[in-house]
Image: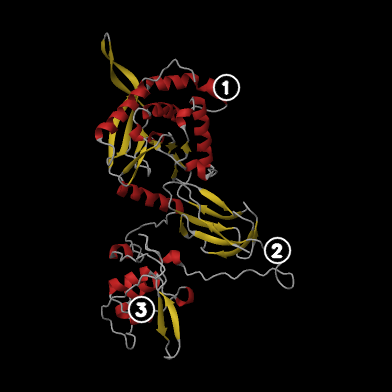
Amino acid sequence: MAIVDLVMPKLGESIMEATILKWHKNPGDFVQQDETVLDIATDKVDSEVPSIVAGRVAEILFKENDVVPIGSIIAKIETNVHASNGSNGTFVPAPVGDMHEEAEEIDEQGIPYIPVHHHVQSTNGTAKINRFYSPLVMNIANSEGISMSELEAIAGTGNEGRVTKKDILHYVANRHTMPQVSGVKNEPSKVNVKQTPASSVTVRQAPVEEIYAEELPKEYEGNVEIIEMDRMRKLIAKHMVNSKQTSAHVTSFAEADVTNMVLWREKIKKDFEKQNNTKITFTPIFIDCLVRVMKRFPMINSSVDGDRIIVKKDLNIGMATALPSGNLIVPVIKNADELNLVGLSKKVNSLADAARNNKLKPDDTLDGTFTLTNVGTFGSLMGTPIINQPQVAILAVGAIKKRPVVIETVQGDTIGIRHMMYLSLSYDHRIIDGSLGASFLTAVAKEFEQWDSNRSW
């Protein structure tokens, strides 16, 4: 018999972790190849993880609602087993290893979990037990000057009496009101975490601000309502902050006269839907113009990897889509430059429908190289969008409004009522300077304005 590791699958270039929503199998259950073992979720999409082999689930390493890094082993599957392996013909499940609640103790900055064994003297002075202290607990002990003997006296609520983050934070908050343990002095001392011989990973001393980021619930004055973020909103918040910390954001603005585009769509939309069995919105029209300009400005379609610039040859356009919950998701139109207006319309509509009905597949949100967001859908004239990492630019289009503007003609200037729209481009100033960003945005605005009102689709 062989043991096969089931790992958290890679779900995209910028996705580093996923949340376990539900286990469909328990330790000891049999599973067929390609049968669903668990459901997972990222900030982009929910997905199913199938078994890569047929066999029996020998061990499950994470619990539901745990956030697991991509590539981590989440379960072990025993192959070459039969449904009946007990002496009396009944199924005997394989023993499952202890769960040490690593995920709960891992620092948000990525401190690896390294079990540290400590022999603790029992109260009768005879027996000794092994206690595990995670790096996060050890860091808090260091910062608060908690000695090892004092740490050993803390009652743990974790597995096998292990001291958790909540235990030590509760102890710190009530330290001065608790009776002093006999033989324990509250003297500052450092708890040393030694590197394990089998690993080259060194435990990092986390700053105090990081340790207590989620310390204790705050009390709020006045008449307030407290709403817990849902899973997707937490992940969106994390990625938005990460984007601002990663990229040097700059936003440029332009204005476009889209009268020709508006009148053309109004003229052909009924025949378009009748002949192609799909509606034509402004989004595919914008993308049709956008990809033509992107070919002239290849740096806009790139990403940054350390000191290297990765220029993408595929034009994969993400379109920010609002969900009924109020959250946003960004499905991706792969190779958008290879689709005509009919193909773009069908793809845009199918992805938008799948997003709103929670039917997107993981592949539908992967490999985007540039993002378009329509803030005008909700009435905004313009916006300053946040870059969708690891991309380097995002275009926002505002609401189309009728306004009196000056029209330049060969006969002279005149004033007319035109359909006007603001465009805003946020870009990563690490590699895109203002001249490049502004030139690209101006070219997009001109492409919108020069829409051929006599073209066919």
Name the element at disc 2: loop
Q: Which mark is residue 250?
A: none
Give the amino acid at mark 1.
Answer: Gln
The residue closer to the viewer here, 6 or 161, is 6
Q: Is residue 223 above or below residue 246?
A: below
Q: How far across and down, in percent of the image, does residue 18 sit?
A: 47, 54
Disc marking residue 151: 3
Position of 327 relative to 145 (above/below): above
Q: Label 2 is placed on what type of residue? A: Ala
Coordinates of residue 80 in the picture (x, y in percent): 66, 61
Q: Is mark 1 on a helix, strand or loop?
A: helix
- In this view, the residue farthest toward the top is 411
The relative height of residue 419 versus residue 119 in the rendered view (above or below) is: above
Residue 275 is tagged as 1
Left or right relative to 277: residue 193: left
Count of numbered tags? 3
Q: How far apart are marks 2 and 3 (CA)?
A: 47 Å
Given this view, does label 2 or label 3 mark the residue nearer the observer?
Answer: 2
Task: Residue type at mark 3: give it.
Answer: Leu
Tell me how far mark 2 sits from mark 1, CA to CA: 56 Å
Crowdedness near tag 3: few (<14), some (14–19) or many (≥20) residues, C-alpha within 10 Å: some
Residue 157 versus residue 278 in the image, above or below: below
Give the farthest residue toward the right: 88
Q: Can residue 369 be seen in this view?
A: yes
User: How would you rate the neighbour count of disc 1 (Cα within 10 Å): few for under 14, some for 14-19, many for 20 or more?
Assistant: few
